[in-house]
Every structure is written in structure tokens, then in C-alpha cells.
Image: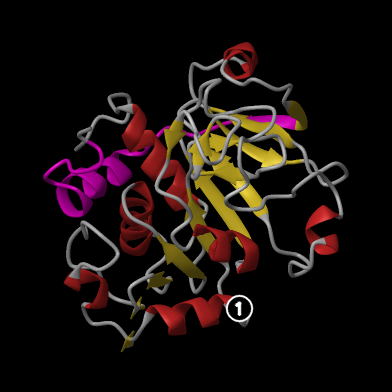
Amino acid sequence: MADHTDYNPLELLVCVASRLLEDNSIVFVGTGVPMAATMLAQRLHCPHVIAIFEAGGVAPQLPGLPISVGDSRTSHKAIMATTMNDVMETCQRGMVDYTFLGGAQVDMYGNLNSTMIGDDYQEPKVRLPGSGGANDLGSLCWRTIVVTPMDKRRFVEKVNFITTPGYLSGKGAREAAGLPIGTGPYKVVTNLAILGYDEDTCRMRIESLHPGVSEEEVQDNCAFDLLVARHLDITPPPTPEELRVLREEVDPDGYIIGR
């Protein structure tokens, strides 16, 4: 039996992210931690979760950890092996409950940047990969879950470029921009805490501290002032069963958790 006191930050990220999913929900899954989190959820508490992959796999029973969204395993025992157009249309029709996203920068309103670092778009300091499907997913899915390590370079007061809209400039801004009412940022899962958003201001707030982490440590790793939930929780550590399934069934070769 795995020791629940012996886990690394990536194992914690995967376990915490997996717990946010609900059975019978529909989740759009990206490469890396989101795949491991979805597989873990499917094996433990969400046997009927419907995973959708950008290359067209819908509701597979993942036999092993895919290495990309186009891996053949994303269509294993799937109800459909379709196209990128079809799965993006599914988001547009309002059928996708959750999406996992990441980025080089995220700000207090959940806007994501995966396009560039710097002040000049034509000559940035760093040119990043760009949106892929992230803008579509963050714009159209009901709840966006960001999974990322936490430090001041990532958690910035204002992103250099809005690749994927969060709450834009605050409450009401998404709707004013024409995005579907009720969609948007939901949680940010980091190596230090779980963050959410204040309903009145749409600003990011601390909702749960990971074991051994203080509120001050979280704030020290953020370049803007975080709000704090009225009832601040402590994140339950990975259980022995979560670690066993994650290490033995989901990622036995350590592609994700062994980084």
C-alpha cells in the first residue's frame, strides 16, 4: 500500500485535479496532468465521466496514459472517433462541463497567456506556442480548471497577452464581450493551494491550502493580492488508494508524475 505521507508535488496536483471532476460530467482533456487526472478520476470516483480529446476521441475507456491528444488510446472503446470540428462544436453547443487549461501567465481575473512574453507583439522577449484550442475552450466550456505551478512569473497582475479569456476586467466583462453567460474560470490547482474566484468581484482567491503550506507562502508566490475565502480549507493529501492507482495503473512509467 502506498504511503499517503510520501508524495511529490505533481502527484498532489493530479490527485487534487481529479477530485474536481464529477461522474457523468463531460470534460475536455489536454495533454499531461489533465490526462492523468481524468484517468485517475475514471478509475476511482467517476467511472462514467465523458472525456473529449481535441483530435476527436469521445468517451474512451483509457487503457493507458496517452502521450498526446492524438494518441490512438484516446479512441479506445470510445463512443465516437470524430474530428476537431465536431468536438469544438460540442463546446459551442454548451455541452462541455469542464476543461483543463494551462498557460505561461494567469492574472487575478483568470485570463491566460500562452502567446508571448514582453510588450511588443512583433518582437516579444519570448514567443510561446499560442492558443491551440485554448481560446475556444476557455470561451465556451462551462467551467475552466487551470493546473499550474505557482510563482510570481506565472501569477501576474496583468498578462502580457490574453490568449484565453477569463473574467477579462472583472464582473460582467465576459458577458459584455459576447461570451456565453455562466461560463468561465472555476478553479486554479497549484502546488501550494486551490484557488477559486470571488462571486462579487470575479477576483482570484485562496480557497484551500495544501498540507504544510501557509497563507503567506501562497501570497509570496503571487504578484497580485489574492483574496481569501471566508472559510479556508486544508486540502486532504492524496490517499493511499489514489497513489496506488496513479502510480500502478495511470502513470507507471512516470511520464507525468516522475518529472
Q: Is residue 244 magenta?
A: yes
Q: Does residue 142 show up?
A: no
**Residue 75 percent coordinates (x, y):** 25, 78
- Residue situated furthest left in the rendering: 253
- Of residue 6 and residue 257, the one placed in the foreground of this image is 257
Closest to the observer, 125 or 110: 125
19 versus 254 height, above or below: below
Which quarter of the picture shows residue 79?
A: bottom left
Q: Residue at x 35, y 64 (%)?
A: 42
Whether residue 222 is situated above or below residue 252 in the rendered picture? above
Describe residue 182's horizontal placement relative to residue 17 as left or right.
right
In the image: residue 205, left or right of residue 5:
right
List the single residue furthest toward the front. 122
Q: Which residues are magenta?
A: 231-257
Q: Secondary structure at mark 1?
A: helix
The quadrant where residue 161 appears: top right
* Position of residue 241 measured from the top left corner of the image (x, y, whole percent): 29, 45
User: x%, y% of residue 155?
Assistant: 59, 28
Q: Quadrant of the C terminus?
A: top left
* Closer to the camera in the image, 42 or 35: 35
- 219 in magenta: no
The amino acid pointed to by label 1 is Gln
Query: Which residue is under mark 1?
Result: 92
**Residue 69 can be seen, yes or no:** yes
Q: Is residue 163 left or right of residue 248?
A: right
The residue at 49%/16% (across/down) is 212
In this orientation, which residue lies closer to the viewer: 151 or 6? 151
